[in-house]
Amino acid sequence: MIGPFICIAGIVISFVGAIHCWLVYRDCVRRAHVDPERVKRFVESAPLHLLEELKAKRPACQCCGAPLRLQGEQS
C-alpha cells in the first residue's frame, strides 16, 4: 500500500527538481547575453598606451613584422 505512494512521491519530486533546474538554467543563460553598449564602453576605456608599450617589447619578424613567439610561450 505504501509502495505506490513512495513511487508517486518520487516522480513528483523529480518533476519539481527538473522544473527548478530548467528555470535556473534559463535565468543564467539570459544573464550571459552580451550588452553591446557595455562592450563599447569597455573597449573605449582601454589604455592604448599600454598596448603600444607591449607591442614595442615583443620581438617581431624583420621581413614581415609578424610577432615572434617567446621562448617559454606555447601555441
Image: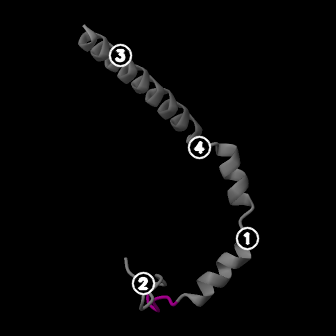
Callout 2: helix, strand or loop? loop
Q: Earlier in the sequence, mark 4 or mark 3?
A: 3
Name the residue tied to disc 3: 9
Question: Which image quarter holds the N terminus?
Answer: top left
Q: Crowding near pointer 4: few (<14 within 10 Å), some, many (20+)?
A: few
Q: Residue at x 70, y 45 (%)?
A: 37
Callout 1: helix, strand or loop? loop
Q: Earlier in the sequence, mark 3 or mark 1?
A: 3
Callout 4: helix, strand or loop? loop
Q: Nearer the viewer, residue 68 or 6?
A: 6
Range drawn in magenta: 59-63
Picture quadrant of residue 7 = top left
Name the residue tied to disc 4: 34
Q: Earlier in the sequence, mark 2 or mark 4?
A: 4
Name the residue tied to disc 1: 47
Left or right: 48 in relation to 33: right
Callout 3: helix, strand or loop? helix
Work out whether 59 lies above or below 13: below
Give residue 15's position: percent from left, percent from top.
38, 20
* Spatial CA span between label 4 and label 3: 41 Å
* Mark 4 or 3, closer to the camera: 3
* Spatial CA span between label 2 and label 3: 57 Å
